[in-house]
Amino acid sequence: MISAPVVVGAAVVYLALLFAVAAFADARARAGRSIIGNAWIYALSLAVYCTAWTYFGSVGRAAATGVWFLPIYLGPMLAMLLAWIVVRKMIRIAHTYRITSIADFIASRYGKSPLVAALVTLITVVGIVPYIALQLKAVSAGYQLLTASGTAGSGTSPAWWQDGTLLVTLALALFTILFGARHLDSAERHEGMVAAVAFESLVKLVAFLAVGVFVTYGLFNGMADIWARAKAVPELASLLRLGGTGGAGAFGYAQWFTLTLLSMLSVLLLPRQFQMMVVECVNERHLKRAAWVFPAYLLVINIFVLPLALGGLLLGPNGADPETFVLSLPLANGATGLALFAYVGGLSAATGMLIVETIAVSTMVCNDLVMPALLRRRDFGARAGGDLTALILNIRRAAILAILLLGYLYFQVAGEAYALVSIGLISFAAVAQFAPALFGGMYWREATRAGALGGLCGGFLVWAYTLMAPSVAKSGWIDDGFLIHGPFGITALAPERLFGLQGLDNLSHSLFWSLLVNVALYVGLSLWRAPSGREASQALLFVDVFARGHATGAADPVFWRGRARPADLMALASRLLGPDAARQIFTEHAHESGVAVGTDLTADARLVDKVERRLAGAVGSASARVLVAAVAEEEPLSPADVLEILNEASQLRVYALALEEKSRSLEIASAELSAANAQLRTLDELKDDFVSSVTHELRTPLTAIRALSELMLDAPDMEEAQRQEFLAIIVGESERLGRLVNQVLDMAKLESGHGEWHNADVDLRRLVRDAVTATTELARSRGAEIVFEAPETVPLLRADPDRLTQVVLNLISNAVKFVPAEGGRVHVSLHVEGDGLVVRVKDNGPGVPEAERDTIFEKFRQGGDALTRPPGTGLGLPISRRIVDHFGGRMWLENQDGSGACFAFRLPFQPDAGAEGPRPAASEPAGKVKALAGGNTREETP
């Protein structure tokens, strides 16, 4: 036993913590740093499905029926398999048309019908109030167990102001009003509420697992010990079999299917699930993570359900309520702290459901019951002349308080008549009646308002007669004779054996008849009459939501015709949304229409639609339709008008796509033109550089030739030795001038594609070796050595041998020029790499500076310092690279980290050369050939 002040204090502290979490989330949202725009937060918020039913009721059901608690969680797991197909479409529809609740969703699909919205809301209130009472019952029962108060036989009950359950109810009402009814636009995110619910999901999971671990591994020696001890007790052994508690009873396939189907529908259709899964979704891509995180959460939280149930039956006192095993087992075994934590977890499970459910239902009550009733009143017109935002918010807040108090009243009157699970299943069966109208409306264009109304009314009445009425009779409120004999003695109308159908449990029986009548009326009435223009337009927007504006980039068609004045629309929006929000609507429309802000706007169909959608976020689509119709003269649309508008929208979409395609083409052409202009500028700069470089290179030898010639002409008596020296210089400069002219001409031919090529089979090993031999004298003059390394044989290439010889000679001669005066070394290698041959020429000279590596292959670029580098034209490397490129190869400069330069090129094998296969390069042995300083050559085995 724990003292009442401690339990109350723990509950108060926990609720205060919820307030803090919600306030923190709202503060972050105001600062532009939302914490709910996270897939993990979204996935955890879906765990609001796990209420006190999960926390307490599942253990009680497992203690009575064994594994029959599982279908309630198998259904949601199966539903999440379809999340990306079904739920994503629900989210897209809701976000596009500012849907605020499940009633608003269904009503909007069927022509924004106020009657459909009101009917869905009434069914919700009737079906959900028992579920709210379930949560309050769980909180009350846990408090009584922990404090040993209010036990049977006490003969007294506390005064209403001392009732802890009532105080919890009022505290939750305050929390919900503060964090769920602060903004008028219900389509906006409730940041604080979502964050609080995600936090509660973690608390109840940790608390439940803590109790499970304590019982399984603290009171027993693991699950195997529990199974073994349960099998030793005949009454408990049956709980481990699918056949049920009756020993060898047959498996109830119908009941298992019913429970799975009910839970599968409920996870999508319960108002709180629709609120968290659809309305509060920030990004539909979050579904991808939620589709596996939420089922994983359900799996984890149910791991210890059966061990707790069996452990409680094995250790608990006779007559103990199995639904309280989560609290009673730790309490009875001295773990009072764990028991208190478990109670906080149960409180978390209950409060999460209560907060979200009341926000969702209060929005439906305000938008779909109260507001339409007020709009029909004549005296409401005077009030409508002012600002309605405060009134609507107060209506919503009053609805929150009323719904919670209604649940508290139901708990006080009938809460003890049914177990937690039974109350929950009654609510599940009620919301299952939404399935045909909602899912059918998302995928079937021919569904009509009459079909939806008929199906909802028929299904709800059958549910009330076959399930709700028997539960009321069994509670003792009315005579239960009709359960056996039927009304007026008509046995065929007995609610639990309707038309003589037997062999099903009460829940399966009710679900069968209610959904049968629902679907039959829905389909039959929809086929009986074609949809109206308004219904057809909404059907197109819902069914084809992925194929319209958000998928194609074009605007959705607006199915509205009539006349309206901008001033009337502005006044309406200001009264319901406030002046600032109203001005924002008109400013956005002006920008979209290409009209200057502040000028007179035309109240076209798109402006009317924009105002109506924004109002729908505040008062629901049905009420928004009524309000807009009051200030605009709308022309009724026929199905033919809808098709005409749709065709116009399709043509506009085609034009928009064509314009977009032309715009892209113009952008591509503009980019190509810019690139061409840049290339022309680059070519012009290269031309200038080329002319300047050629002029400089030509002027240098010409100047030397002219100067020396004039000296010899002016000095006829010049000594013979001096004359011979000058003539040698003139000859050398003339040869240099010739080489330059030849290389310029060669480069020009290669760049223009007019180079001469004489291809033949080339043994690259022999060609490189001959080039090494030819440069031996040059190396000797520099006191350097050339080392050649190659395999014994290499495949033949198809290329021009003279051109390749030119490349190799250029690379070797460049390397020899840059080696040091003493100890110079050039290493020439040939290797087979992949489908080609690679030649590398490496020297131990100063290397290529980092700043020159990117430009070394440009024309007239020479490496080294201008004052000390050897003479050259700067065309050898560009010409060599052009030759290699012509044969499909590549030339590059390898990184050597300051240890000389290494130029390499690669040539691929040609298909016709590859057919000959590799053959020996003549009859020479493999090895390394060295050109030594003395001019001799020798070979070394590698």
Image (cartoon, rainbow, N blue to C red):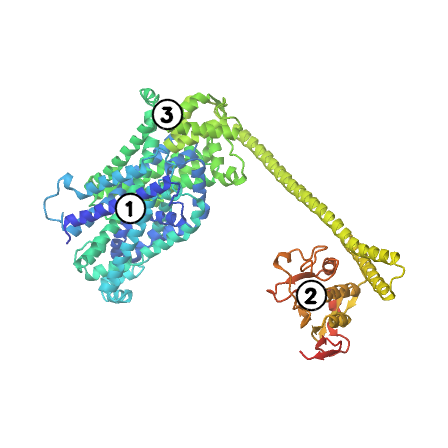
The numbered mark at residue 698 is none
Q: Earlier in the sequence, mark 1 or mark 3?
A: 1
Image quarter where the N terminus lies is bottom left
Q: Secondary structure at mark 2?
A: helix
Q: Residues within 10 Å of mark 1 (few under 14, many from 20)?
A: many
Give residue 359's quadrant in the image: top left
Q: Do we see residue 850 in this rendering?
A: yes
Residue 327, above or below 229: above
Q: Residues within 10 Å of mark 2 (few under 14, many from 20)?
A: many
Q: Position of residue 453 (x, y in %)?
A: 38, 34
Q: Residues within 10 Å of mark 3 (few under 14, many from 20)?
A: some
The amino acid on which the numbered mark 3 sits, given as a three-letter code, is: Arg
The amino acid on which the numbered mark 2 sits, given as a three-letter code, is: Phe
Q: Earlier in the sequence, mark 2 or mark 1?
A: 1
User: Foreground residue, 654 or 901?
Assistant: 901
Compared across the picture, whether 743 is left or right of 21 comes to: right
Q: How many marks?
A: 3
Which residue is denoted by mark 2 in the rendering? 818
Residue visible at 84% across and 55% down? 706
Q: Position of residue 20 (x, y in %)?
A: 28, 44
Image quarter where the C terminus lies is bottom right
The numbered mark at residue 575 is 3
User: Foreground residue, 42 or 525?
Assistant: 42
Which residue is denoted by mark 1 in the rendering? 424
The amino acid on which the numbered mark 1 sits, given as a three-letter code, is: Gly
Q: Do we see residue 112 in this rendering?
A: no
Residue furthest to the front: 717
